[in-house]
Image (spheres, helix red, strand yellow):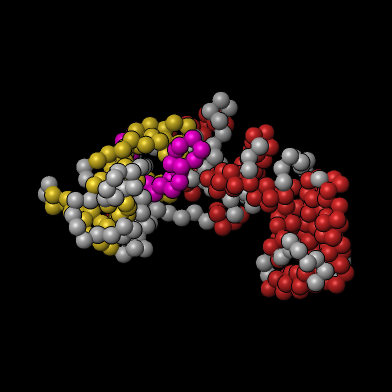
Amino acid sequence: MKRQDTESLAKEIASIFESIRENTYKGGNRFLLTGHLEIGGLLNREFNSYILNEKSRQRMKTLTEKIGKVVKSNFSKRTLYYALKFYQAYHGKKLDFRLSWSHYRILSAVSNLTTRKKLEKEAGEKGWSRELLERYARESGYYGGLKSLKWNRPSGEIYHYKIVKDTVGRQERLRIDLGFRCYRELDVKGFKEGEIVRLSSTKKTWSIQKVNSDCLLYHYLGILERVVDGDTFVAQMDLGFGLTARQKIRLLGINAPELNSSDGVEAFDSLKKKLKPGTGLLIRTHIQDKYGRYLGDVLYLSGKESDYETLRAKGIHLNEELSFDN
């Protein structure tokens, strides 16, 4: 198909934006969504997958400038990219008009189709706000397109903590944040809130010292207790200071089918073959999901009780491995 010249394309898109602005009240949300879908279709025809090359970027910049001279409000280059991603994700599909354009901008940035459909369904049925939908999209590990699929191995050090202030008691004492909402009173002086410390031990004595604030936190050695399903397991986590926490960890970016399906049983069995009870793990935790499970990246070595250095250097990144399996 012959490409439009930039001038006529800009006029056509600007006309649609003006129509959206003037007529949205007539058709409500439906008109807003279908208008952006139409704009996305025009952009997809012109740019398709070549939006990232230099020539296309320059053309998009010129297009944005020309449209911006006509459409004075609620418009930017991002608006065009959002419309393009919206079209690429939803053209030919039935839209849920209970959801706003803000909802669909978020959904269009979810790269996994199954996850996107699930989030769209739940957002419509449960009346999720834009903020709540974005939170669950981020928790899925697929939010943000290709960038979110760049798997990052746990690369920090264990026994590193942040100094926080206890704001519950009458006296605002400093504490060591061990993770998992576990804290230890700071019984030595010379430290400030927000500083990062490293724990070391000599015989039966624990000591801490201040380290670089760029250190990655929330890395733990763990021992696999049991696999729960295709993306969740229970492990005993070494918090340091001789303390252990038993935690349920869900693998970041992995969304296994439910156990009541044949695919779910297959994913469950596959994970059990990789992780036997007693397997040593190096785990980096992130935020909690809506069920209170911590999302985590995991390194392991099959059938081995490995120490920290070995796991960090040679461990298999379980999240990345499962992404190829699925």
Residue at position x 55%, y 30% in the image: 258
Q: From the top left corner, tell me how far across and down residue 216 is, in percent.
A: 37, 57
- 11 with respect to 261 (left or right): right
Secondary structure that dominates the magenta span: strand
User: Is 295 inside the magenta-drawn segment?
Assistant: yes
Residue at position x 83%, y 48% in the image: 25
x and y, in percent, of residue 54 in the image: 68, 73
Residue 303 lies in the magenta stretch:
no
Q: Residue at x 33, y 35 (%)?
A: 246
| Front one among 278 and 105 | 105
Q: Kindly tell me whether residue 168 is visible in this rendering.
A: yes
Vertical comparison of 71 with 204: above or below: below
Q: Quadrant of the N terminus?
A: bottom right
Which image quadrant is residue 262 in? top right
* In the depicted structure, whether residue 66 falls above or below residue 297: below
Magenta residues, start to end: 277-296
Residue 121 pos. (x, y %): 67, 36
Based on the displayed image, in which of its 4 quarters is residue 318 positioned? top left
Asked if residue 240 can be seen in this view, the reply is: no
Front one among 211 and 152? 211
Residue 85 located left or right of residue 71? left
Q: Residue at x 83, y 64 (%)?
A: 14
Relative to 289, residue 15 above or below: below
Q: Residue furthest top?
A: 260
Residue placed most toward the observer, 31 or 7: 31
Q: Quadrant of the C terminus?
A: top right
Residue at far front of view: 170
